[in-house]
Amino acid sequence: MRKTRKEEENKKNQKSNAQRLLDKIRRDNITKIEPVYNPKNGCTNCYPIVESFVDTNVKIAPLLEEISETGVLEKKLFDKMVLCPKCNSQNTTTRYNCPYCNSFNIEKSSLIEHIKCGYMDVEQNFRKGKNLVCPKCGGRLNRADFDYKKAGVWCKCNNCEKNFDIPTPSHFCRKCGSISTFEEINLKNVFSYRVKEIVDNGLSNSSFVNIAIKKFLTKEGWKVDSPANVNGKSGVEHSFDMVAFKGSKIKETMVIDIATSEEMVAEQPVVALFAKIFDVSPNKSLLIAIPKINDNGKKMAALYKIRIIEAKDQTQVINQLKEILKA
């Protein structure tokens, strides 16, 4: 199915927004990105530091997840949101119910023990105005942990008037009005992000490209290792940015290196890749040049039978990679 113009624009915007976030991290020396709960949206798009400068239609959680895969951000579990099993809303509240009649119309009190005489009752039965007075012996309770101590909690149901110490929790959805138990609700992980390292445009670009290629090849049935080491015929181990395998008995092997430059990649990455593939003998060898490679590099790549992909972003890389795999 051919992608619509809107889908193409959204994909392009996702890349530009990712780069914009990286630029903001560098410029403002941001060290962490934490979610803030919003009663309307919960924690779907709840990162104000990101919301302030990305496009309004951008899904922030996938954007942060993509950037974390580059190694720039380290994600950490921040919270678990309770989702309504009926409408999937995060706008839920916890209710504490009577274990006998299931009403949430309960009163919670503190249990107090008078240390001197040992009498125990709920706090309101000790209360006389602003003072605490023992109903049994009439002694004044002035100092906590000396005259009296807290002995726990006690609840009373205003519906069935029964007493109990431990209520039964449930979850009420403010959006659809349904009530669910712990067994029925869904839990959603919400993450915070710590900035691990500040990267330049070239490194961040190659990182996004690496992730895009890996996802695409995996979807096409390739087993991908990145980065990867391969033993050559000489016994020497060679490092590649990515190695992909396909097939069960007879495996097809493809090796990929990524080279970046502010303006133009020189021919050295071609020479380095040829030295490795001469010993490894893969079925396909690719060099991704971001944004492009010089004429000497192109001539040497043609001589060494190395396919060159020149691209400014991952979308251009994947489009050319599709054509190469079709050939």
Image: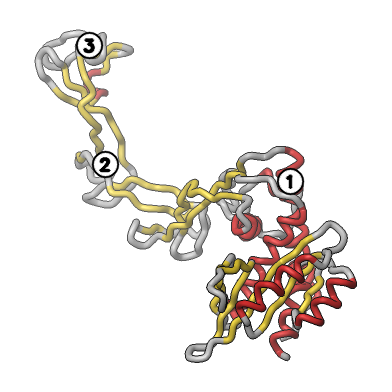
Residue name at image x 26 percent, y 10 percent: 143
Hey, which residue is sitting farthest right in the picture?
295
Query: Which coloring applies here?
Result: secondary structure
Residue 7 visible to an observer of this rendering: no
Residue name at image x 33 percent, y 45 percent: 96
Q: What's the amino acid at mark 2?
A: Cys
Residue name at image x 66 percent, y 59 percent: 59
Disc 3 on helix, strand or loop?
A: loop
Residue that numbered label 1 is attached to: 52
Quadrant of the image occupied by residue 162? top left
Q: What's the amino acid at mark 3?
A: Leu
Distance from the alpha carbon under mark 1 to that under mark 2: 47 Å
Identify which residue, 81 or 162, lies in the foreground.
81
The mark nearer the N terminus, 1 or 3, is: 1
State the count of labels: 3
Residue that numbered label 3 is attached to: 141
Residue that numbered label 2 is attached to: 157
Residue 140 visible to an observer of this rendering: yes
Instruction: Give coordinates of residue 42: x percent, y percent.
Output: 56, 51
Q: Are marks 1 and 3 in contact (CB under 8 Å)?
A: no
Quadrant of the image occupied by residue 27? top right
How crowded pointer 1 is (Cα within 10 Å; few <14, some 14-19, many 20+) is rated as: few
Disc 1 on helix, strand or loop?
A: loop
196 shown above or below 291: above
Q: Nearer the viewer, mark 1 or mark 3?
A: 1
Instruction: Give coordinates of residue 38: x percent, y percent.
Output: 59, 47
The mark nearer the N terminus, 3 or 2, is: 3
Q: Nearer the viewer, mark 1 or mark 2?
A: 1
Distance from the alpha carbon under mark 3 to that under mark 2: 28 Å
How crowded pointer 3 is (Cα within 10 Å; few <14, some 14-19, many 20+) is rated as: many
> Does 75 sit left or right of 256 as displayed?
left
Instruction: Give coordinates of residue 86: x percent, y percent.
Output: 46, 65
